[in-house]
Amino acid sequence: MTATDIAIVGVGKIARDQHIPSITKNDAFRLAATVSRHSEVDGVENFATIEELLEQRPDIPAVALCMPPQNRFDAAWTAIKAGRHVLLEKPPGATIAEVQALVEAARDKGVALFATWHSRYAAAVPSAKAWLAERKVESARITWKEDVRRWHPGQEWIWQPGGLGVFDPGINALSILTEILPQPVRVTSAELEFPEGRDAPIGAQLQFAGASGETVSADFDWRQTGPQTWDIDVLTNDGTLKLSSGGAEMTVDQKVVIQEADSEYDGIYARFATVVAERAIDVDLAPLVHVADAFMLGRRIAVDAFDM
Ligand code: NAP
């Protein structure tokens, strides 16, 4: 198999922690270049802007966009127009319309577009989906509580408009929820906690309802120190399912069914190889729609200032 050359744009935390190791492990890809203003990867050619990359390396057919969502559209648009396959980190954009525009542009150009949701590649998610498909969901509870200082050290963009605040991790839970529930739900109310001086929430509580009377609640919090909580509990007519550790573990009626180490990004690059080979468009906006709806419906609550 000939490896597809790929360039990473935005060499920050997620590029170093996950994308580079998963690309290195995957024979289908070869890291051929980076675009970074502040960083370099040993032995890999670096460009200051994506325009320079696209102009000087027409031989690189694919790019992985790992910068914050507020800057992703322009880069994706330019890459698609230049005929490159594009992988988008989550969330796929800062607005819904901009991602829809990318889908149209990719379709016109005949290139692959993959809006990744890494949590959907957590080990237990496919099994949870299969288990729920044969049952009636009565209610679900999401508890997603983590320490923003630990996972986003020094990152200012997450507090700025379009950075999503606590929805940056919360959307991971919503990407699992929208994957595993047999029927869709819709946001019915939300409370968003904005620290003084910040443009994005540090906490959020959401309520959802489905067409068959099922209810879902979500509690997102960025102030949790100590052990971190990434749990989804689903009560059905035939037992209770729990996904924990962000989807890596699954129990049914408290018995462990799956417990595996994280390999989400290996799954993402395995999928991207297929998406590229098929020139496919793999874009599901459902998690982003829930976040947008929470911002539309949400009651805003002022809370204490928060220093990083
Ligand atoms: P980060 O550490 O701040 O890195 C983002 C990189 O994007 C920066 O290092 C910078 O790279 C580049 N960039 C381009 N324009 C920028 C701008 N205007 N402001 C800041 N950076 C800019 O962020 P990250 O944690 O890697 O997150 C990036 C994306 O990955 C987000 O969408 C996030 O939701 C997602 N993600 C993050 C995590 C996590 O644990 N942190 C997990 C999963 C997904 P250069 O200096 O190289 O130009």
Image (tube, rainbow, N blue to C red):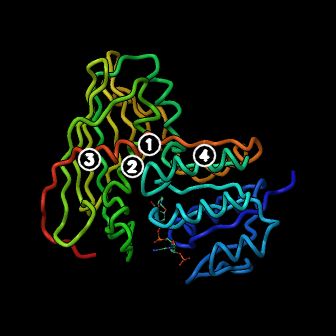
Residue located beneath label 2 in the image:
171
Residue located beneath label 1 in the image:
175
Q: Give the mark, 4 or 2, whose residue is nearer the N terminus.
A: 4
Residue pushed farthest right?
1
Q: Give the mark, 4 or 1, whose residue is nearer the N terminus.
A: 4
Residue 200 in the figure: left or right of residue 125: left
Q: Nearer the viewer, mark 4 or mark 2?
A: 4
Amino acid type of disc 3?
Answer: Met
Amino acid type of disc 1?
Answer: Ser
Note whether 187 is above or below 7 in the view shown: above
Residue located beneath label 4 in the image:
104
Residue for point 52% across, 72% down: 12
Amino acid type of disc 4?
Answer: Glu
- Report how far apart the C-alphas of labels 3 and 2 lie in the structure: 16 Å
- Residue 28: percent from left, percent from top: 77, 53
Question: Answer yes or no: do the residues labelled 3 and 2 have beta carbons within 8 Å?
Answer: no
- Residue 20: percent from left, percent from top: 64, 65
Q: Give the mark, 3 or 4, whose residue is nearer the N terminus.
A: 4
- Report how far apart the C-alphas of labels 1 and 3 lie in the structure: 19 Å
Residue located beneath label 3 in the image:
296
| Label 2 CB-ligand 1 distance < 8 A | yes
User: Residue 183 is drawn in which quadrant?
Assistant: top left
Q: Give the mark, 1 or 3, whose residue is nearer the N terminus.
A: 1
